[in-house]
Amino acid sequence: MKTLLLLITILTLSSCADIYFSEDAYMLAEKQKTFAIIPPKVSIAASKKIDAASMIEQQKTESLNFQKEMFSWFLKRKTQGSFHPEIQDVETTNALLAKAGYPDTPLTSSEICTILHVDGYIVSNFQLSKPVSEGAAIALSLLVGVGTATNEVGVNLTINDCSQSKMIWNYAFTYQGGIGSSPNKMVNEIMRSCSKNMPYSQH
């Protein structure tokens, strides 16, 4: 039973993170006064139970959910003093981008900065998959006492600076969640983990 309880909340890392910093990342991050969160691109592994149209709608829903989760996370860290730029609210970001035709119309970094009137922004990609079902994972843990991932999230986060129109930070990782986990719950853990390596972490 103790093993099962541990599996309910466990979040494991399946690989070492790939992290990139530009030479001037900390200096540019320090100068940013406003910051936006671009709607994440979410890819969900194909399933025979979900048709193509439903899959597209689910990806749009998850994108908005993830964006809001990230906004809440940054806002909380700002109140704690560990993140200094003002964060543009999600509704404003999405409305301004929609008027510009995004995402159907590709936008350059400079165009995004001009449209949103910010000093920096984060772009993210999430790849979601379910290696095994909750039922199969529980059965396996009870039979052989071995836990397995029920949710897997591949994440790629990029921070861009508007003054230089360039990427100053990139973080790529794959996370695995055990029984009781969900992609939405994992976003907070993902942000908590990667924040230790963000260029804002020392300011």
Image (cartoon, rainbow, N blue to C red):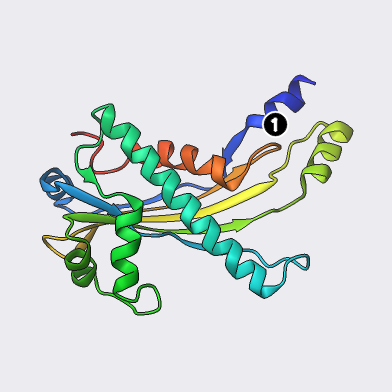
Where residue 120 appears, as percent x and y from the top left, is 21, 55
Q: Is residue 173 visible?
A: no
Q: Is residue 60 above or below residue 101?
A: above
Q: Is disc 1 placed on a helix, strand or loop?
A: helix
Picture residue at 81% right of the left edge, 37% below the top: 138
Q: Quadrant of the C terminus?
A: top left
Q: Label 1: how many residues lie within 10 Å, few (<14), some (14-19) or many (20+)?
A: many
Which residue is label 1 attached to? 7
Residue 84's image quarter? top left
Tell which of 47 and 2 is nearer to you.
47
Residue 101's image quarter? bottom left
Picture residue at 27% right of the left edge, 53% below the top: 36
Q: Is residue 106 above or below residue 160?
A: below
Q: Quadrant of the N terminus?
A: top right
Picture residue at 18% right of the left edge, 70% below the top: 110
Left or right relative to 110: residue 57: right
Left or right relative to 195: residue 85: left
Residue 148's image quarter? top right
Q: Residue lying furthest top in this view? A: 2
Q: Residue lying furthest right in this view? A: 143
Q: Give the number of marks.
A: 1
Q: Is residue 95 visible?
A: yes
Picture residue at 47% right of the left edge, 39% below the top: 188
Tell which of 165 and 169 is nearer to you.
165
Where residue 80 appears, as percent x and y from the top left, is 28, 26
Hey, what amino acid is under mark 1? Leu
Left or right relative to 55: residue 80: left
Where residue 139 appears, as percent x and y from the top left, is 86, 39
Where residue 189 appears, as percent x and y from the top left, is 49, 37
